[in-house]
Image (cartoon, helix red, strand yellow):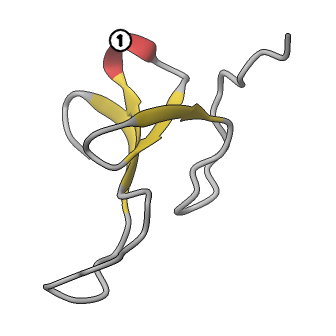
Amino acid sequence: MNENSEHSCEMPKTSEIEIAGPSIHYCKEYFNDKGKLFAGNGEYESQVNFCPICGFKAPIQIEKE
């Protein structure tokens, strides 16, 4: 974990050179959004209720409309 997040997971690499890998590379709980989890790939991020890598449940869940 780094100083900018509480929860932080990275998808394990399957090889050094990946042509088509997982669409999610990491899941983080950012300091400014404490309690919300975001899964992303370095270009896009989405808020999630559970970490897709380890299953950690976000303390703040996505609100249903």
Q: Nearer the viewer, residue 39 or 59?
A: 39
Q: Is residue 18 above or below residue 47?
A: below
For the C terminus, the quadrant is: top right
- Residue farthest along the bottom direction in this orientation: 15
Where on the picture, by quarter, is residue 13? bottom left
**Residue 25 place in picture, x, y as percent:** 35, 58
What element does badge 1 sit on?
helix
Q: How many numbered badges does the structure rendering display? A: 1
Answer with left or right where residue 17 lies relative to residue 48: left
Mark 1: few/some/many CA within 10 Å (<14, 14-19, 20+): few
Answer with left or right where residue 57 lies relative to residue 5: right
**Residue 28 place in picture, x, y as percent:** 40, 39
- Residue farthest along the left direction in this orientation: 16
**Residue 38 place in picture, x, y as percent:** 47, 34
Q: Is residue 65 above or below residue 35?
A: above
Answer with left or right where residue 14 lies relative to residue 56: left
Q: Is residue 58 above or below residue 42?
A: above
* Residue type marked 1: Asn
Where on the picture, by quarter, is residue 2? top left
Tell me which residue sits at (36%, 25%) in the image. Answer: 30
Determine which residue is flagged by label 1. 32
Tell me which residue sits at (68%, 37%) in the image. Answer: 49
**Residue 33 place in picture, x, y as percent:** 44, 15
Q: Which of 40 and 51 is in front in this view?
A: 40
Where on the picture, by quarter, is residue 12? bottom left
- Residue farthest along the front direction in this orientation: 19
Q: Nearer the viewer, residue 18 or 62?
A: 18
